[in-house]
Image: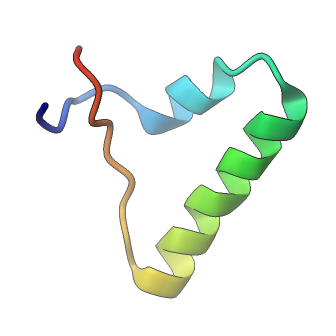
Amino acid sequence: MEVTENSVVDFIEGVESEKKKADALILRQEYRHRFFYRAFAWWPS
C-alpha cells in the first residue's frame, strides 16, 4: 500500500459510530499537536 490523496477527515466523518468518530478525531488532534505528525490515508484509493 502507499499513501493516497484521500482525506483522513472525510474517512473519519464517514464512521457511523459517534463514539468512534469522536475518538478518532481526538487521536488525530493529539498526534498532530504532540508529535507534529500529519495523518495520511494508507488504504487503497
The residue sitting at 68% across, 49% down in the picture is 25
- Observer-nearest residue: 39 or 20? 20
Residue 15 position within the rendered picture, expressed as x and y whole percent measured from the top left:
69, 21
Which quadrant of the view contains residue 20? top right
- Observer-nearest residue: 4 or 17? 17
Residue 18 position within the rendered picture, expressed as x and y whole percent measured from the top left:
87, 30
Quadrant housing the C terminus: top left
Residue pushed farthest bottom? 34
Quadrant housing the N terminus: top left
Which quadrant of the view contains residue 38? bottom left
Residue pushed farthest left? 2
Residue pushed farthest front? 1
Q: Is residue 37 above or below residue 44?
A: below
Residue 2 position within the rendered picture, expressed as x and y whole percent measured from the top left:
11, 35
Q: Is residue 31 above or below residue 27?
A: below
- Would residue 42 appear left or right of 2 to someone viewing this image? right
Which quadrant of the view contains residue 29? bottom right
- Would residue 33 appear left or right of 20 to someone viewing this image? left
The residue sitting at 39% across, 79% down in the picture is 36
